Amino acid sequence: FWDAAQAMARSYLEKFPEAKDRLDKKIIIARAYINLNQFQNAVDYLKSIKSEADAEREPEIQFYIGEALLRAGQYEEAIAEFVKIPLLSKKTKLQWEASALYYSGQCYEKLGRIDDAIRMYKEIIKRPGIDLVLKKDAEKRIKQIQ
């Protein structure tokens, strides 16, 4: 499936290089790399397209960089990429900030750094503008690991 999705997105970009939805297709290519376990290709590709993104799409691309590193087992590097979202990205309609903090917590758990994981989950709870459901998930995760 992901091979086909990537091939179709590449073909579309060749035929319509100036299409308004070209960034969407490039993100599909990158997500295909992630799902095909080609993590470094995904990271390199995402970094190369990040400059094309507006303030609404930039945190999404940044999140996928962190996700690729997380799935590659490069937890320290993933954390470094995830925390760029709440620190450097503008707030968007979607909850990329909360997701980045949550997955940073997941990485800390994988590293055995439980106090740091709890700190990330508490950050979700205390930040304004984060969806209540996500705050409750963070509370639940803290209870599970304590």
Image (spheres, rainbow, N blue to C red):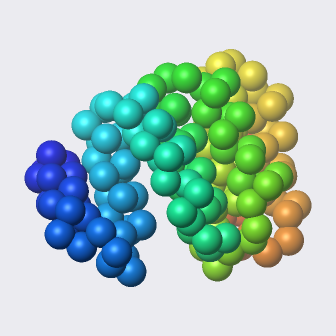
Residue 18, position as x, y percentages in the image: 34, 75
Say whether residue 102 is visible: no
Residue 12, position as x, y percentages in the image: 19, 67
Q: Residue 98's image quarter?
A: bottom right
User: Residue at horizontal 59%, vertical 57%?
Assistant: 51
Residue 47, position as x, y percentages in the image: 53, 44
Position of residue 74 relative to residue 85, above or below, is above
Task: From the viewer's perspective, tell me whether residue 38 is left or right of residue 2.
Answer: right
Nearer to us in this view, 131 or 41: 41
Position of residue 50 relative to residue 38, above or below, is below
User: Residue at horizontal 35%, vertical 50%?
Assistant: 31
Q: Residue 38's image quarter?
A: top left
User: Residue at horizontal 38%, vertical 80%?
Assistant: 20
Q: Residue 130's image quarter?
A: bottom right
User: Residue at horizontal 81%, vertical 31%?
Assistant: 116
Task: From the viewer's perspective, tell me whether residue 65 is left or right of residue 133.
Answer: left
Task: From the viewer's perspective, tell me whether residue 96 is left or right of residue 84.
Answer: left
Say whether residue 95 is visible: yes
Q: Quadrant of the C terminus?
A: top right
Nearer to us in this view, 120 or 75: 75
Task: From the viewer's perspective, tell me whether residue 82 is left or right of residue 88.
Answer: left
Q: How many numbered marks, from 0 up?
A: 0
Residue 86, position as x, y percentages in the image: 78, 55
The residue positioned farthest toward the top in the image shown? 112
